[in-house]
Image (tube, rainbow, N blue to C red):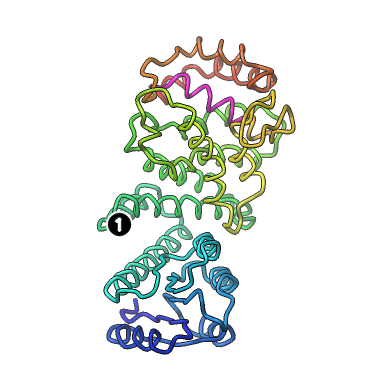
């Protein structure tokens, strides 16, 4: 592995550019560029590890450039450094995957720390990519991840897991992996990593895996292709990933949520979509299932208030499975869980209003024929 890394500095401010070059070239090979043509030439020709870019550079379109770099090599880390204070441009840059942002005048120690962190992140992501392509088993991958991220903050570890889960989802939905019949293996990896994300919360631990299992019980009894059934299960595993962008103070609140709390919680389907939307290979179906799993059959759900069968099938399936698990599990604000029979009665009561009646019927039949399996899995 190369110890000396290749850093590309994109800035039309001579003083700032030369200052960065002087400090970085002690340990790394530094390239300087101002115009888009030269920047892309270096990206394509040399193995660039990190790019620092001035969002206010007049010779480039920064957002277009960031997007082009990430499309060519998603593992190149990009750090924005700028006087430019256009909030919309900065938010777009964050959306397209910059690692960090620093306003000018910047402090050199902070920039150097950020660059070193970005180098470490690129190395880790490339190693994860290699292990995914070799289909490392979940235990080996989790062990490697734990050791490699030992110095990360809790938030950085969480972000790493989210990105990894999103990347695995992208692999799983890739056409060439369907041909190789690798989807079930990737599904197991997503299950393992989702459990890792939930493990610190005793109230949600195992929730996504159970919802995926329940969704699978329903999907198996529908006239769907195998890959469509697996896609519903994958979406079920990821359905609450958007909650990771919401304060744990809300998620773990031990009293009923007030109206303001609920408005924040209701953002999680869209936040989840944002996390995986830009990934190559993410299907429209997967995205729509995550986005619409809280719609109601009567149109009183969120985020769009869709009704009946205008709600995507996977969203309707996950909605039933999610509600059942919520009723039969402990929650921070609800210490007494329902019995399976009581929860089934509640599903029936809410058919036609909250849930698709046909899917509820399928689910209850499946639960009653799989009671022994369910008991061994979740008790």
> Foreground: 169 or 265?
265
Q: Is residue 131 left or right of residue 364?
A: left
Q: Is residue 115 magenta?
A: no
Q: Position of residue 264 (x, y in %)?
A: 49, 37
Q: Is residue 179 above or below residue 89?
A: above
Q: Position of residue 347 (x, y in %)?
A: 58, 16
Q: Write the residue at 41% across / 45% down.
A: 193
Q: Position of residue 238 (x, y in %)?
A: 51, 41
Q: Is residue 131 left or right of residue 367?
A: left
Q: Write the residue at 39% across / 24% down.
A: 331
Q: Is residue 4 above or below residue 209?
A: below
> Foreground: 343 or 15?
15
Q: Is residue 322 magenta?
A: yes
Q: Write the residue at 34% across / 76% down.
A: 1
What range of the chain is rendered magenta?
317-330
Q: Position of residue 106 (x, y in %)?
A: 34, 74
Dot 1: element: loop
Query: What residue is pinned by disc 1?
Result: 149
Q: Is residue 201 left or right of residue 72?
A: left
Callout 1: few (<14), some (14-19), or many (20+) C-alpha neighbours within 10 Å?
some
Q: Quadrant of residue 206?
A: top left
Which quadrant of the rendered structure holds the C terminus? top left
Q: Write the residue at 53% across / 44% down.
A: 184
Magenta span: helix, strand or loop, mainly?
helix
């Amino acid at each position: 592995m190369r110890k000396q890394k290749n850093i590309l500095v994109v800035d039309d401010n001579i003083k700032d550019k030369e200052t960065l070059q002087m400090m970085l070239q002690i340990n790394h090979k530094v390239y300087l560029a101002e115009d888009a043509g030269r920047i892309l030439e270096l990206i394509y020709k040399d193995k660039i590890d990190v790019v620092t870019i001035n969002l206010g550079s007049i010779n480039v379109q920064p957002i277009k450039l960031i997007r082009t770099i990430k499309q060519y090599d998603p593992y190149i880390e990009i750090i924005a450094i700028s006087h430019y204070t256009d909030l919309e441009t900065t938010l777009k840059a964050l959306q397209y995957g910059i690692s960090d942002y620093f306003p000018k005048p910047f402090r050199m120690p902070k920039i150097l720390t950020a660059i070193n962190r970005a180098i470490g992140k690129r190395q880790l992501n490339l190693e994860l990519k290699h292990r995914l392509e070799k289909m490392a088993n979940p235990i080996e991958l989790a062990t490697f991840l734990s050791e490699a991220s030992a110095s990360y903050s809790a938030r950085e570890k969480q972000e790493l897991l989210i990105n990894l889960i999103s990347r695995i989802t992208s692999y799983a939905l890739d056409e060439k992996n369907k041909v190789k019949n690798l989807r079930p293996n990737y599904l197991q990896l997503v299950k393992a990593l989702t459990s890792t994300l939930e493990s610190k919360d005793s109230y949600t631990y195992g929730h996504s895996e159970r919802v995926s299992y329940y969704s699978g019980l329903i999907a198996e009894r529908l006239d769907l292709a195998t890959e469509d059934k697996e896609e519903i299960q994958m979406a079920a595993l990821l359905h609450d990933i958007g909650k990771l962008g919401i304060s744990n103070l809300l998620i773990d609140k031990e009293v009923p949520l007030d109206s303001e709390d609920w408005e924040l919680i209701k953002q999680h389907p869209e936040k989840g979509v944002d996390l995986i939307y830009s990934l190559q290979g993410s299907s429209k179906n997967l995205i729509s299932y995550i986005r619409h799993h809280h719609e109601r059959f009567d149109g009183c759900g969120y985020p769009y208030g869709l009704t009946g069968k205008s709600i995507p099938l996977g969203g309707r399936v996950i909605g039933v499975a999610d509600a059942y698990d919520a009723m039969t599990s402990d929650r921070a604000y609800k210490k007494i869980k329902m019995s399976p029979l009581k929860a089934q009665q509640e599903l029936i009561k809410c058919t036609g209003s909250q849930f698709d009646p046909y899917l509820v019927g399928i689910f209850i039949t499946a639960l009653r024929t799989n009671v022994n399996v369910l008991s061994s899995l979740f008790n």
